[in-house]
Amino acid sequence: MQWLEGLWTKEGAGIDKNAPPLTGLALFLDIIKREWWEMVKLNLLFIIASLPVVTMPAAMLAMARISVSFANDENTYLLRDFLEALRKFALRGTALVVLSAFLVGAGVYATVSYAGAARLQLVYSLPFAISLAVTLFLIVLNAYAIVLMARQDLPLRETLRQAAFSALITPLPMLTALGFVTALWVAHILFYPVSVFMPATINFSLGMFALCFAARTAAQKRAPIPEPAGRST
């Protein structure tokens, strides 16, 4: 049974430390190429950990913690690191995800309500536009918040403060990542039943990796930092 244990506990693939550093889309695709199988296993871990439903927020933060390591080219021991993060974010992660769902849900409800009213009376066009902008901002803010909590282990209030700053200063990287996540699920719907296995194999982990990579890119744009040394083979 050692081969089965090694499947979940061994280190991820390495990279040549003498290779020229990649950036942007090239780096994004290179990491996906190297970590593809790890992302499939991470996706399965997230689904299994989310089966009780109440554990889904903590599982989401645990998946984000692993995805941050992927984005930073850090060594990962998938099962061990995932379980540690699952315990670590059991309370704070749940609080963050529940709060995020409430805020975004309220924004969506207001947007839909004003959209219906604006079709009947033009005076509601301005409230509709404001509620739409606020809802988009909240979506970007909460995406940043999930990544920031997983990456920096911050208290909830500080996480939200820094996430709001990131959403105001550098919204474009996260909006692009959210568009990529949306495209994954649209592809699943459009190509069903051919795409029936996408959610079970890659959609969750690849989507979270896109958010973590976007947050890393945004942080580098605000305050450039040296590229991580990466993992040597």
Image (cartoon, rainbow, N blue to C red):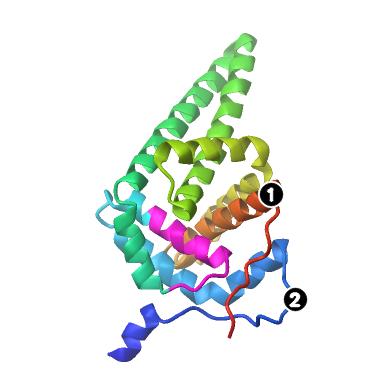
* Dominant secondary structure of the residues highlighted in magenta in the image: helix
Q: What x and y, as percent, mark residue 126?
A: 64, 15
Q: What x and y, as percent, mark residue 22?
A: 72, 69
Q: Is residue 94 above or below residue 42?
A: above
In the rendered structure, which amino acid carries the disc numbered 2? Pro
Residue furthest to the bottom in view is 2
Q: Is residue 108 above or below residue 32?
A: above
Secondary structure, mark 2, is loop
Q: What x and y, as percent, mark residue 174?
A: 61, 47
Q: Quadrant of residue 229?
A: bottom right
Residue furthest to the left in view is 52
Residue furthest to the right in view is 20
The structure residue drawn at horizontal position 56% and vertical position 53%, both measured from the top left corner, is 211
The structure residue drawn at horizontal position 32% and vertical position 55%, both measured from the top left corner, is 88
Which residue has dot 2 on it? 20
The dot on residue 223 is 1
